[in-house]
């Protein structure tokens, strides 16, 4: 087993409207130098992966899923309770088989990573893309990564 923790940051969404928030956050983090600052992390953007999301958990100590969530103040980050999402969220996705369904399946298959965090980006009513300065989200993610032992070298 590797002594170096391995992690993956996954922006989930689609190219449409507010659902692209997860993608935009990953793009911002990449241009802000996060991959160089956190070299033990892998960065991915996935288009409505459905059950394929589970494949991205393999071999990871930490997985952070960045995704849009309806409600709140557009552009604000929120950490979601993974257990509650698995228990209560199944069937709520507009994608047919969304993140909550994939997490429920991964749990049933005992394929959840050791540490899983959902970093939700609030998108208000979800009718429009969320133009935002992602510095607050970047700060939230940086603190989260350090909490899980992924401090910059």
Image: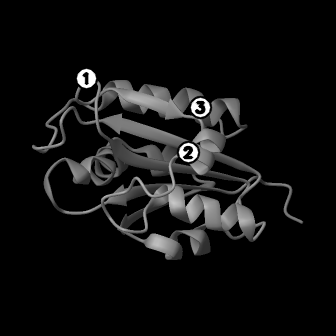
- In the picture as drawn, the residue positioned furthest to the left comes out as 128
In the image, residue 7 sits, relative to residue 33, either above or below, namely below
| Disc ID at residue 144 | 3
| Distance from Cα at disc 2 to Cα at disc 1 | 22 Å
Q: Tell me the residue at 27%/46% (across/down).
A: 21
Residue nearest the observer in this picture, 141 or 82: 82
Examine the image and state in which quarter residue 125 appears: top left
Q: Tell me the residue at 50%/48% (across/down).
A: 89
Q: Is residue 144 left or right of residue 136?
A: right
Identify the residue under disc 1: 73
Examine the image and state in which quarter residue 103 appears: bottom right
| Distance from Cα at disc 3 to Cα at disc 1 | 21 Å
Q: Mark 3, mark 1: which one is toward the viewer?
A: 1
Q: Position of residue 22 (x, y in %)?
A: 33, 49
Q: Quadrant of the N terminus?
A: bottom right
| Disc ID at residue 150 | none
Marks 3 & 1, CB-CB < 8 Å contact:
no
Q: Secondary structure at mark 2?
A: helix
Q: Tell me the residue at 55%/45% (across/down).
A: 88
- In the picture as drawn, the residue positioned furthest to the right comes out as 1
Examine the image and state in which quarter residue 91 appears: bottom left
Q: Tell me the residue at 42%/71% (across/down).
A: 49
Q: Position of residue 50 (x, y in %)?
A: 45, 71
Identify the residue under disc 2: 88
| Residue 153 in view here | no
In the image, residue 123 sits, relative to residue 10, either above or below, namely above
């Amino acid at each position: 087993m590797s002594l170096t923790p391995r992690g993956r940051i996954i922006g989930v969404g689609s190219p449409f409207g507010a659902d692209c928030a997860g993608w935009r956050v990953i793009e911002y983090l990449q241009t802000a130098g996060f991959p160089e600052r956190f070299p033990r992390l892998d960065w991915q953007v996935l288009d409505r992966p459905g059950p394929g999301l589970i494949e991205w958990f393999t071999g990871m100590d930490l997985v952070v899923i960045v995704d849009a969530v309806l409600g709140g103040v557009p552009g604000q980050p929120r950490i979601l309770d993974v257990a509650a999402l698995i228990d209560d969220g199944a069937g709520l996705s507009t994608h047919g088989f969304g993140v909550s369904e994939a997490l429920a399946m991964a749990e049933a298959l005992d394929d959840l990573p050791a540490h899983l965090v959902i970093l939700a980006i609030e998108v208000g009513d979800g009718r429009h893309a969320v133009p935002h300065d992602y510095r607050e989200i970047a700060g939230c993610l940086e603190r989260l990564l350090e909490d899980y032992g992924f401090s910059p070298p």
